[in-house]
Image: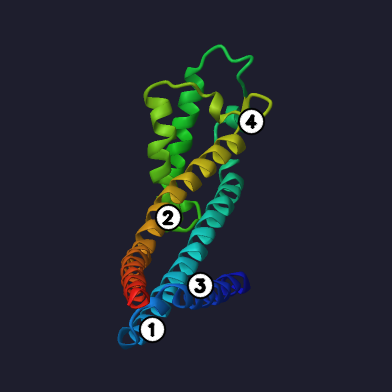
Amino acid sequence: MIKSLIIIIFSIIAAILCAKLYNKKVIYLFSPRTRKVFYFLTFMFFICTSISIAVLINIHLFLNNTIINYTIKIEKILIDRLPEILVKGIDLDKITDPTQIYDSLNELINMISGGNDLQVNKFTNDIIIKSIDKTLKPIIKYKRNVTILADNNNIITIGSILNFLAIMTIRYINSIFLKIYIIFFIPLVVYIIITMIIALIKAKRSKTATGKITET
């Protein structure tokens, strides 16, 4: 909670400072008649964008932490329900029949997908299931290389699988939030581009007028 407030407060302060600087360097070139309106609009665009991004960052961090905590919790719950081969670990250097790996993965997926009795948040479980559809299921369906699921010792365990799943889920969340960040930045970027073009035109006109007066 404190961390979230710090992010929001810092973002508001940064927005105010940026807005002041932008008003001083760009909006100041506007005519006195329209300057006050654009001073206000600058503060509105910068502060609203900043607060929105700060809130999104907090949600983003919360979801990533939730996924990590989810995998830790679910490992403890599933450890007694999983096939013994996954609990002990599958040594890829010694395995002769990869079929048992795919069968064990399939069983794990079924347990997570039917997560009503796993005592975990439904929203989080739904995100994990979507990630499973994109990561683990294709491995089983197309019999892909399973070394990506192994730990540093080339052994597949429940922990290494859930760690892989957490990493891929966080990447999935990151890709979604990256698009959202861009969407929220667009209005501010458009405002900056438009006001800079207007400021450049006014500055050019002012310079031209000054040149004519000097010649006279």
Residue 159's place in the image compared with 142, above or below, is below
Q: Which residue is mark 3?
A: 18
Quote the CA–CA distance across marks 2 and 3.
24 Å
Q: Residues within 10 Å of mark 2 (few under 14, many from 20)?
A: some
Q: Which mark is residue 177?
A: 2
Residue 45 on image: x %, y %: 39, 74
Q: Residues within 10 Å of mark 3 (few under 14, many from 20)?
A: some
Q: Which residue is mark 4?
A: 151
Which amino acid does the dot numbered 2 rest on?
Phe
Whichever of labels 4 and 3 marks the residue nearer the N terminus, that label is: 3
Image depth: mark 2 or mark 3 in front? 3
Image depth: mark 2 or mark 1 in front? 1
Q: Which secondary structure lies at badge 3?
A: helix
Quote the CA–CA distance across marks 1 and 4.
55 Å
Q: Which secondary structure lies at badge 1?
A: helix
* Display coloring: rainbow
Quote the CA–CA distance across marks 4 and 2.
28 Å
Residue 175 on image: x %, y %: 42, 48
Residue 159: quarter of image: top right
Residue 183: quarter of image: bottom left
Residue 210's place in the image compared with 66, above or below, is below
Which amino acid does the dot numbered 1 rest on?
Phe
Quote the CA–CA distance across marks 2 and 1.
29 Å
Q: Which residue is mark 1?
A: 40
Tell me the quarter of the image containing the N terminus.
bottom right
Query: Do we see residue 115 in this rendering?
Result: no
Q: Nearer the viewer, residue 211 or 61?
A: 211
Residue 134 on image: x %, y %: 39, 37
Q: Which secondary structure lies at badge 2?
A: helix
Q: Which mark is residue 95?
A: none
Whichever of labels 1 and 4 marks the residue nearer the N terminus, that label is: 1
